[in-house]
Image (tube, rainbow, N blue to C red):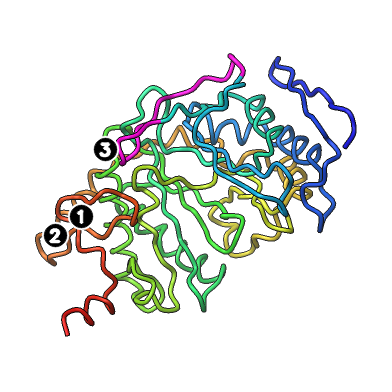
């Protein structure tokens, strides 16, 4: 695989072993190509990950080999990469890495990390999210164009609630919209706000958008995955490489680019060119911090006027007071009959 090489970024030297190892056989991209990509977009991905506890999605043998998610910081973690202790719904905890620069990204890339999954919190306060994340997930029978249509409808909903969103491709068929918020609310409150936003979006276009947790009820609609705001759920960061044959990346976009941009436009080869031309189009996110008061008031109205309470949590999450039964409707009906 060739001798190791040493890369320098931010005053730190990072050793890259087996730089010629092929990570994406279909395109011929190597481990060194991945590292050089992260060097090129270093400031952008450093902004997206800065001081956030981050889970590493590792592919040590490339996309054709085995993979795993690493939550706990490796024992060989350099002293210049900080960590934060995160508590999980199960009651367990882990010390996760908190990147504070591109050097930490390169260090993780040397371990075969392709995709970075940051928590919506910072190291200084791991109990109060500072991002509301909206995941627009295409269901069977829908695609990226449908997600774009949903995002275009989402934008005015957010603005009416005093929220400003920043869209990006998922690197697959979907779209993510991140809203920077003041870190004043708990995970449960942020999730409640996400449900309220999703329900309002669903009310405006019920034939194309849904908040239904059970797949059998979603139909050919865009699912607003509100549970991506549940504790211990993360979303791939901006600029993360996705483990597919084309080596696409999660690309930050301007709102006006949504209709013309395609997920396949952004990969290991093309994103560096775009970055050189336009830079990090989400660089101003932290200067637009929003509040959730109006979204939470909307959630309250839904409860008072429409009887719309909580929605189911993910199956591995501990049962929450007031949560509906976690039984898919068709099965519940068979039991009742």
Quarter the C terminus occupies? bottom left
Q: Which residue lies under the disc numbered 1?
A: 299
Q: Earlier in the sequence, mark 1 or mark 3?
A: 3
**In this picture, which residue range is highlighted in magenta?**
78-93
Mark 3–mark 2 Cα distance, whole angstroms, equals 19 Å
Q: Secondary structure at mark 2?
A: helix
Q: Choose mark 3 or mark 2, whichever is in front.
A: 3
Quarter the N terminus occupies? top right
Q: Which residue lies under the disc numbered 2?
A: 303
Mark 1–mark 2 Cα distance, whole angstroms, equals 6 Å
Residue 160 position within the rendered picture, expressed as x and y whole percent measured from the top left: 31, 54
As rendered, which of 156 and 127 lies closer to the eye?
127
In the rendered structure, find residue 186 and report the number of the disc placed on it.
3
Q: Secondary structure at mark 3?
A: loop
Residue 28 position within the rendered picture, expressed as x and y whole percent measured from the top left: 85, 51
* Side (left or right) of 243 relative to 126: right
Instruction: Tell me the crowding category of disc 1: few under 14, some 14 to 19, or many 20 or more residues within 10 angstroms, Cα based.
Output: many
Q: Secondary structure at mark 1?
A: helix
Q: Residue 262 in magenta?
A: no
């Amino acid at each position: 695989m060739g001798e190791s090489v040493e890369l320098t970024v931010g005053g730190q030297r990072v050793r890259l072993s087996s730089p010629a190892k092929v990570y994406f056989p279909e395109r011929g991209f190597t481990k060194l190509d991945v590292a050089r990509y992260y060097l090129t977009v270093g400031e952008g991905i450093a902004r997206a990950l800065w001081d956030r506890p981050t889970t590493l999605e590792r592919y040590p043998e490339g996309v054709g080999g085995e993979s795993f998610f690493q939550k706990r910081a490796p024992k060989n973690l350099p002293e210049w990469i900080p960590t934060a202790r995160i508590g999980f719904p199960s009651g367990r905890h882990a010390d996760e890495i908190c990147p504070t620069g591109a050097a930490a990204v390169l260090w993780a890339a040397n371990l075969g990390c392709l995709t970075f999954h940051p928590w919506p919190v910072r190291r200084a306060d791991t109990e109060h999210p500072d991002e509301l994340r909206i995941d627009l997930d295409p269901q069977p029978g829908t695609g990226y164009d449908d997600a774009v249509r949903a995002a275009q409808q989402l934008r005015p909903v957010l603005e009416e609630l005093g929220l400003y969103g920043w869209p990006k491709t998922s690197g697959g068929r979907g779209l993510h919209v991140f809203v920077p918020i003041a870190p004043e609310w708990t995970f449960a409150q942020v999730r409640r706000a996400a449900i309220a936003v999703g329900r309002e979006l669903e009310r405006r276009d019920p034939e194309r958008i849904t908040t239904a947790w059970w797949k059998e009820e979603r139909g050919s609609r865009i699912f607003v995955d509100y549970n991506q705001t549940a504790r211990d759920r993360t979303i791939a960061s901006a600029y993360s490489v996705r483990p597919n044959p084309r080596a696409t990346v999660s690309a930050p976009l301007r709102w006006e680019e949504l209709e013309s941009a395609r997920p396949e436009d952004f990969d290991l080869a093309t994103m560096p060119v775009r970055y050189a031309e336009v830079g990090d189009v989400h660089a101003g996110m932290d200067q637009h911090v929003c509040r959730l008061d109006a979204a939470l008031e909307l959630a309250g109205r839904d409860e008072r006027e429409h009887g719309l309470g909580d929605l189911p949590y993910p199956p591995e999450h501990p049962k929450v007071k007031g949560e509906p039964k976690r039984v898919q409707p068709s099965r519940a009906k068979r039991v009742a009959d």
